[in-house]
Amino acid sequence: MRETLYDLIAANKRKTFFFIVVISLLLGIIGYALIQVFDWGIPAYIGFGLFIILYNIILYYNSDKIALATTGSVPADPDEFRMLHNVVEEVSIAAGVPKPKVYITPTPGPNAFATGRNPQNASIAVTAGLLEIMNRQELQGVIAHEISHIRNYDILLMTVVAAIGGLIILLRDFFLRSLFWGGRSRRSRQGGKAGAILIIAGIVLAVVAPIFVALIRAAISRQREYLADASGAYITRYPEGLAQALAKLRDAHRPVKRASDATAHLFIANPFGKDRVSIQTLFATHPPIDKRIERLNSLVI
């Protein structure tokens, strides 16, 4: 049975909700371990529960701002970047979505990403390096790819994963540092096996949680990239444009400044400078560019 665009959109919304619930439970487990290990008491349970609720609310309404701030992106001046605004507008019209806000990421590494919670509250950011090497048709292909992420509601799922991934990594670091500085005094007060078990469980959670996020992020991103390539090609009716753009991105070998493991999957291509061998691993956030180009060249529009 073939899936329609509406089926894919509904599936993305379900995945986003499921991911937020699972990560909230995971955060709750980590919080419980922290409170037990350091004996912070009932107020800490209440505080941590409120933190999870507030974090999810803030995440939903501000995930795009977090991604843009993390990458150092700034609004693109309509006069200075007239062609970029024109391309975004014409591709948005072709895709049937509102024109997203347009940002520039000030880095020579060529790349682009989309973010936001829905098509009415979406943003597209392209790097200064991308504008330097792309012609208009190639830029159309890149923008169409990002517009496809917006139209398919990939942006909410991918941005939520990025923000939660960053939080999990911060919590891991906090937990490990707390154990280092306060673990010995806690163990001496507790005594016995219970304290040791809690500490070991906390360390395991702190280490496993980021791996869990990375695996889901990578699996989601690879699948979404293939779909956005095909959808973008159908929007422009010119798959060669995106294929040529991907070839330039593959050959650029220039990293995006301020890109991190938490935000890597947002970009159209690997933001770390090259299509690395590790792209084949479980943790790879993008499928190999050569394979993406091959698929685009095989499309019949």
Image: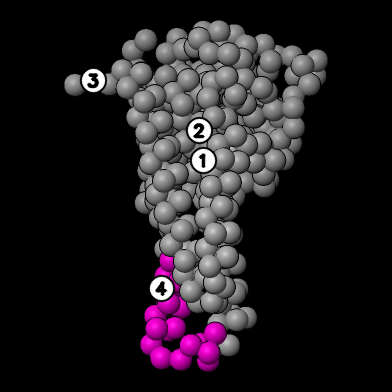
Tag in front: 2 or 4: 4
10 Å crowding of disc 4: few (<14), some (14-19), many (20+): some
| Disc 1: which residue | 160
Q: Describe residue 104's horizontal placement relative to residue 180 as left or right.
A: right
Question: What's the CA distance linking mark 2 and mark 4?
Answer: 32 Å
Q: Position of residue 146 (x, y in %)?
A: 53, 25
Lower position in the chain sequence, tag 2 or tag 4 = 2
| Disc 4: which residue | 201
Lower position in the chain sequence, tag 4 or tag 3 = 3
Residues tagged 4 and 1 counted as in contact (Cβ below 8 A): no
Q: Which residue is nearer to you in this view: 301 or 218?
A: 218
| Disc 2: which residue | 156
Q: Amino acid at mark 3?
A: Arg
Query: Which residue is pictured at 33% across the width and 12% down the height?
Result: 300
Q: Amino acid at mark 4?
A: Ala
Q: Which mark is residue 2?
A: 3
Query: Which residue is pictured at 69% across the width and 15% down the height?
Result: 85
Lower position in the chain sequence, tag 2 or tag 3 = 3
Residue range (magenta): 186-205
